[in-house]
Amino acid sequence: MKHSLLRMVLGLVAALALSGCAGTGYYWQSLRGHLALLGAARPLPEWIAEPQTPPLLRQRLELAERARRFAVTAIGLPDNASYTRYASIHRGFVVWNVVAAPPFSLELHRWCFPVTGCIGYRGYFSEAGARTEAASLAASGLEVSVYGVPAYSTLGYSNWLGGDPLLSTWIAWPEGDFVQLMLHELAHQEVYATGDTAFNESYATAVGRLGTLQWLKETSTPAALQAYEASETRRREWRALTRGTRERLAQIYASNTASTHNQQALEAMKQEAFSAFRAAYAELRARWQAQGSTAPQLAALDRWVAEANNASFGAQAAYEDLVPAFTALYEREGRDWPHFHAAVKALAQLPASERLARLQALQGDISFAASQSALCTAAGPHPAPCP
């Protein structure tokens, strides 16, 4: 009985991993929100067999079953209860994350948690709760950002309760994006380094991208591959723009530590960098529209650009900056998934500073262009250009 209770507590604590240390009110909203998801979820075969299930939903759930098997057999991700059930939650996002950063730094404010360690975001099952927390942080002088999240991982701790369910928040996404998010979240259950958000998210992002290209090549249709590559080409351009802006901001903020600029000068350089970013995005957006993208398709990016600050750029860095290193590691391991996961697990056991140094060395030893080629060649011939 004690063992079962311990497992329940650990599972629910891990479900709160999108949080930090907080009072009982915060824990209660997290616990209640997660249990509501579990209670709404039913096994995929039940949904598929139910006559009232809409045909398009049934097709997507069947796709989910195939993608889940592929994740296990081809990508080497955990074979457990996660993503074998589905829940309709009737809202656009499952969680809203809050991130914060100082006025002259991209380093995220961190919340510490006994299972996940210190992480750079805090999640709420209601947008109102997230906005309240953001307002409190802003009042303390931090820049803040609130963004919706379609899925999160309990790191496998709640598999005994039925596992993380598929959700209506992302069930209708295009095939490539849908599979990528599933692989990303499952990767968190394969390897997790306590307290290292950038390592965990970049690893999961790399697994999602590489695995999705393999899925599209081996099991899907040319049309699905073409649609994903068209979207991925735009995302590569977006990532290049934001990466360049983060580097420029980091250089500006580094001068603050050297005490070579006063606050007014730093603020002026910062605003100039943000203005240049928005102008460059406007040019990129116009080109995308000329290529067929519509205003509704670009609405989320428009909002992100309009609200961009240190917090939003800092959060993006956690998901992106180490992806080339993990892609290079995948190349080094001969594109062998079990060897790759084992190498990542070995890195996760190292002290954080040594772990980062080795990843940076990987990026130095294998050029960024070469590491990106793995993302291209993994899917074979491409209708869209690969850098």
Image: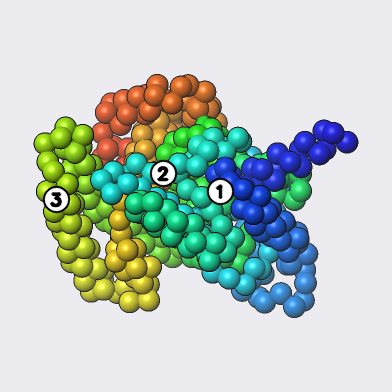
Asked if marks 2 and 1 touch (Cβ < 8 Å), the reply is no
C-alpha separation, residue under disc 2 versus residue under disc 1? 14 Å
Nearest the camera: 283 or 208?
283
Instruction: Name the kind of residue labelled 2 in the image.
Output: His
Residue located beneath label 3 in the image: 264
Of labels 2 and 1, earlier in sequence is 1
Mark found first going from the N terminus, 2 or 3: 2
Disc 1 or 3, which lies upstream in sequence? 1
Q: Nearer the viewer, mark 2 or mark 3?
A: 3
Name the residue type under label 3: Gln
- Give the labeled residue for mark 2: 109
Instruction: Give percent across and percent down for residue 108.
Output: 38, 44
Q: Nearer the viewer, residue 199 or 106?
A: 106
Q: Amino acid at mark 1?
A: Leu
Residue at 24%, 54% in the rendered image: 241
Task: Return the residue at label 1.
Answer: 18
Note whether 295 is above or below 77 in the view shown: below
Q: CA distance from mark 1 to mark 3?
A: 36 Å
